[in-house]
Amino acid sequence: MLAAMSPAKDGALGTLKLILQMEAAGQGYSRALEDYLEAVIKQSLQLVEKPEAHAGEALVEALSLALHVRSDDGLRQSLESILKGEVEKAASASAALKSLENRFDARREPTHFSSGVYSAL
Amino acid sequence: MTPAVNLHILAAEFTQLSRSAFFEPAFQEFSAKTAEVILHVLQNAKKYPEEVVRQFQELTWNILQFVSGSRSNDAPHETQYVLRKALKEWVSEDALVSSAALNGFEFFVNLADFWEFVDHVIDGYDVDGYSPLVVRIGSPAAFRHRPVFCVPLFHELGHFVDHNYKISEASVLLNLGPTPDGISAEQWQNLNVQHRMEHFADLFAACYCGQATNQSLFAIAPNHGDSPTHPATDRRMKVVDDFLAGMPNPMVDLLQEALKARKQEPLKVRFVEPSVECFNDVLTCKIGSVEELYGIFLSSWGYLHTQLADRSAPWITLDADASTIEKTVNDLTGKSIRNYEIVERWKNVTSD
């Protein structure tokens, strides 16, 4: 409905989450997926630092991820350690995945915010 | 039921669909290629991690709804024709448009980027440049021949464009005010995304349908207040009013800035209102341009509501009720759009 429906978000971070899941489970995956993971993480970190400089060319997944990163220091640290290829990569992937799956979802938000919050929008 | 069993079932479904008649023939190729990639995954199941096969299977089930829905003859054809035109102004990739006729009163535009997933994840299969977006437009089945009432689909198309380029999310990355009391930073950020998505979709619709966007919103949700997912109706209407009047508005500026940052065209009025005075004589409107094709939604909306209020058209007899009036106006609007489409097809044939 005009006031209630938005497009399905199946493509937003689905592939990224899938790769993180495989990384966390210690499963191997292709070089192409490794490159994709690296590109999305790198771009999202750049977007958080300088959105105006990087928004033009960024992958849509990186834009979505950047918003998550900006409001979650733990997620940022996990992604940075994945990028560095540190030994605890699987643990970092697992932590990143957990952060992404526990995010705010307005459709499931049980309460209304105060009028002060809405008037600040 | 294992993913492999499901994939066998899906392969059979898509093979069958590839031999079926479609309103849009590109769906035959889509079905054949989908059957092909399913068979590839089945034959190489050991090569792919279990989670990949599982997710591939889930996405394939999802896409099945899109494809099978496009076989039905209950879509609002005229509105879809105009939506396709609008979509092409924003998305250069091939986009297949399918439809869903709904029993309830709802509208949606869904996206399936199935082939992007195949391209990224099913790396043993060469997509060979084949990567169409699939868009599914859902609208009430009862509105199949009522294009005037399908104005909300332009709003939904706006969500699709936003989703495709992440305009609202980019706008929040670029500009976010300080977090007020009573909400966490994360909630504040996401609340802004949600509300900007709605404003963007409204403005997008206003580019094509002008004030009919606000009028249809008001008809559906006249007194809705602010919620976590949507701004209050009066706030939404104000943003559209300012945009159409060329008045400064901070929300419009935020979204225009994000469009620019994402290297997209700015929001601008893209329609011209054709005169529908000819409806008084129960004659269709001769639409002269694509701008008028968009504009007929506003012209017809205005004409319909004028006639419902003052019944001044000569064809409205004493015994004509609201249903007769809306049916006639919707019918004339649909036929006007269809005439434009036929002329366009004819021109395309003769110019080839």
Image (spheres, coloured by chain):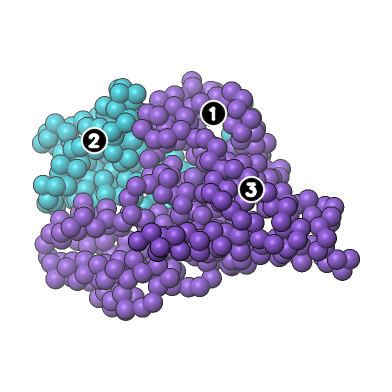
Chain colours: A cyan, B purple
Q: Position of residue B296 (x, y in %)?
A: 62, 51
In contact (CB < 8 Å): disc 3 and disc 1:
no
Number of the label disc, if any, that sits on residue B322? none
Residue under numbered circle 3: B274
Number of the label disc, if any, that sits on residue B251? 1
Q: Position of residue B14 (x, y in %)?
A: 30, 73
Whether residue A65 is visible, yes or no, is: no
Number of the label disc, if any, that sits on residue A41? 2
Callouts 2 and 1 on one subunit? no
Local secondary structure at mark 1? helix
Residue at (46, 52) in percent of width and height: B85
* Disc 2 to disc 1, C-alpha distance: 29 Å
Taking depth in this image into account, of B55 and B343 the one nearest to the observer is B343
Drawn side of residue B8 relative to residue B284, left or right: left
What's under tag 3, amino acid-wise?
Pro
Drawn side of residue B174 relative to residue B9, left or right: right
